[in-house]
Image (cartoon, grey):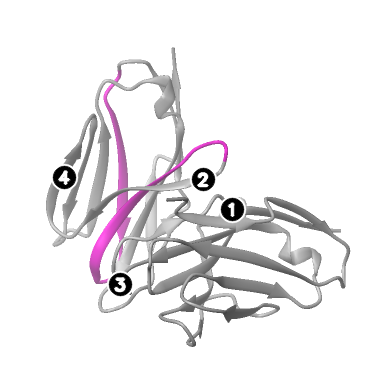
Amino acid sequence: KNEVEQSPQNLTAQEGEFITINCSYSVGISALHWLQQHPGGGIVSLFMLSSGKKKHGRLIATINIQEKHSSLHITASHPRDSAVYICAPQGSGTYKYIFGTGTRLKVLA
Amino acid sequence: NAGVTQTPKFQVLKTGQSMTLQCAQDMNHNSMYWYRQDPGMGLRLIYYSASEGTTDKGEVPNGYNVSRLNKREFSLRLESAAPSQTSVYFCASSDLSRAEQFFGPGTRLTVL
């Protein structure tokens, strides 16, 4: 079993829809990161979470440490949100990220 | 600030050739990382450097060597390239070993 599981693997949405991407992990962590990778390939850090909830614009990330689960929400989705979203828990007391395989999101106009 | 830069962006090698991937950061970060990304898999850590003069193996170090030339630069060398090393390579940096990582644009390497 993988240490990090993301769902769904692929998602197609209509512009304006509310989107949720889920991440479950099986290891103890010090933080969890959500990353965005656009079709051009560059990787950008969206959030670093150790508890609760964070919001940047239309993006919201939550984490439940007890349940070892995190979600990334996109409100009022837009075609420019089309990208791969990667969940990356950071192991307790370590620098190492454990990368999920990503969720490929396509938002249609 | 340029952030994390990588050269080259694309490279095609023949089996057995050698090459060095270059990475530099201008954020005064202590820690630097090399990852590879393969289809259907998450990014995997090849090597890590906590600070100038130190390097540690990651999950998939075989076939690679690294050099932390100074605080800014961290290079990855393939001494004898193999088709299994066809991948996209990302360099990243962070200011503390446990903090947010900033990624370079990637190098797409094909080994024939």
- Check disc 4 and report the residue beneath it: A54
Say left or right for A26 vs A60.
right
Which SS class for mark 2? loop
Which SS class for mark 1? loop
- Amino acid type of the residue tagged 2 in the rendering: Gly
- Check disc 1 and report the residue beneath it: B106
Q: Are marks 3 and 2 on the same chain?
A: no
What's the CA distance linking mark 2 and mark 4?
Answer: 23 Å
Q: Residue at x 65, y 54 (%)?
A: B107
- Amino acid type of the residue tagged 1 in the rendering: Gly
- Check disc 3 and report the residue beneath it: B96
Provide the chain ID for the residue under circle 1: B
What's the CA distance linking mark 2 and mark 1?
Answer: 7 Å
The reply to whether discs 2 and 1 touch (Cβ–Cβ < 8 Å) is yes
The span picked out in magenta is A17-40
Say left or right for A54 vs B18.
left
Residue A89 locus on image (x, y percent): 32, 62
- Check disc 2 and report the residue beneath it: A42
Which of label 3 and label 2 is nearer to you? 3
User: How many residues crowd around disc 3 within 10 Å: few (fewer than 14), some, or many (20 or more)?
Assistant: some
User: How many residues crowd around disc 4 within 10 Å: few (fewer than 14), some, or many (20 or more)?
Assistant: some
User: How many residues crowd around disc 1 within 10 Å: few (fewer than 14), some, or many (20 or more)?
Assistant: many
| Viewport quadrant of the C terminus of chain B | bottom right
What's the CA distance linking mark 4 and mark 3?
Answer: 21 Å
| Along the line of sight, the residue nearer the viewer: A93 or B104 | B104
Residue farthest along the top direction in this orientation = A109
Residue B16 locus on image (x, y percent): 87, 73
Which of label 2 and label 4 is nearer to you? 2
Which SS class for mark 4? strand
Against B21, is A104 above or below? above
